[in-house]
Image (cartoon, grey):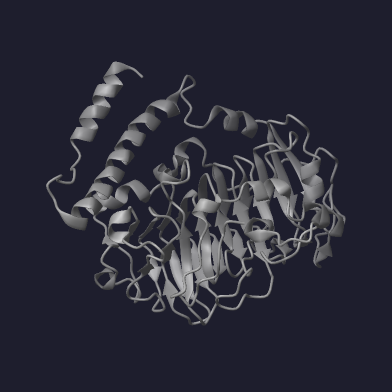
Amino acid sequence: MALPLLLALAALVASLPSASLATAGTAGAFDSWLSANQKDFAINQALYAKKAVGDTGSTIDESLSKAEDNKTTYVVDPKGGGDYKTITAAIDAIPEGNTGRVILDLKPGEYREKIFLNLSKPYTSPNVTFKSDPKNPAIIAWSDTAATLGKDGKPVGTVGSTTCAIESDYFVAYGVVFKNDAPLARPGAKGGQAVALRTFGTKQAFYNCTIDGGQDTLYDHKGLHYFKDCVIKGSVDFIFGFGRSLYENCRIVSIVKEIAVLTAQQRTKTIEGAIESGFSFKNCTIMSEGGGDIYLGRAWGDSSRVIYAYTEMSKEVVPVGWDGWNIKQPESSGIYYGEFKCSGPGSDARKRVGWAVDLTEAQAKPFIGTHYIFGDSWILPPPTGNSPPSKKGYSGGAPATSPASSPESADSASSPESADSAASPKSASKASSPKSAYSAGSKSD
């Protein structure tokens, strides 16, 4: 790194307010965390500005830019009017070594299959798009739970319950419904986790999508993710993982009459890379369809980090807002829960637990823009226009209006071994909390 940039960074960091080392007790510890986040933002912002320009002057990642210049469309229609009848067949058809953008144009209807866009397969490329019509969407659905038995006769676990697992980088989805329609687990029941979508690749974007399930709906597992204008439905911990993700203009909906918990963020010092993670919600709406109380989040990790900014909160959001779960001293562990200029009857920050923070503008700034996920280098506008024509000669065909089954692909994709290997380490598993009515076991499997 050039010396002038280093000097500039040093000056930038030195100019930021820092917590007093003489401050005693938990207040000093928490102020230090706030200051550290502000400094991290300033350093990353300066480094990113240099990296983004690069040799070409373009702010978009070079590999992504090349992919966008080389697009291919596969039409998928469960009624048989496209290039492929199943999404799995279309994914399998992506050529080995492909570097262009592959758009799967998903015609309306239900795709009854488990989808696994797997990094370990040499022919599965980055730069894949699932595109549908938000007004008449493709619905990807399956009904496994953690207790479902796999081919080996053992429960598939939380990861194996997933309807759609995306490990591909630079993935984009537009107007798609990801659904796990397993029966809703009873509060406290073991093995009721039922993941609709698992995001493990990095630099993934989801526009106008619906992610619909119950317990553990969205496994925001790892990587940089952007959710815009999406609907996310669930009951317990229905946005969980250690992704570094921005949720913008999304509706977060509790579907139960019992206690609901929106997030279980896994930021912890015990998992490599997790300490840089966290969930940020901006201009979102929190609401209940079931009428039960809502917690904004509970701490899966010792440094769990969740921010809500400019978010409307319904009356079902409990006054204390947050739950420390099994963290004995959340005020000093490194947990970072904050709110900034939220609204609605459930947004009164004065009634929150003492270790949550009503953020100032300076404290909130690192989290409330696409800079939080370094988005200038990879976030593209949603693919709302016409896709390039299919190279396989698809001429249109009739839209699918009824559900279609894909038993072959679903069976072959059930409980993939590589997905199991990507589960969180045992040392970081979510343990059941005996004092919480909404507790529902471990997420380690």
Q: Is residue 249 visible?
A: no
The front one of 72 and 302 is 302
The quadrant of the image that shows the N terminus is top left
Q: Is residue 121 left or right of residue 13?
A: right
Q: Is residue 193 left or right of residue 36?
A: right
Q: Position of residue 364 (x, y in %)?
A: 30, 52
Indicate left or right for 229 with 38 as reference. Answer: right
Residue at 18%, 43% in the rendered image:
17
Q: Is residue 144 left or right of residue 257?
A: right
Image position of 293 with respect to 116: above or below: below
How far across and how far down the image is residue 173, in percent?
Answer: 62, 51
Position in image of residue 150 (x %, y %): 77, 59
Looking at the image, residue 82 lies above or below residue 399: above
Locate the C terminus and report the quarter of the image it occupies.
bottom right
Question: Relative to 152, does residue 383 appear above or below in the rendering?
Answer: above
Q: Nearer the viewer, residue 17 or 67?
A: 17
Residue at left offset 53%, top offset 78%: 289
**Residue at figure coordinates x 28%, y 56% from the top left:** 332
Q: Please report the residue visible at 62 percent of the width from the left and 44 percent of the height from the top.
A: 171
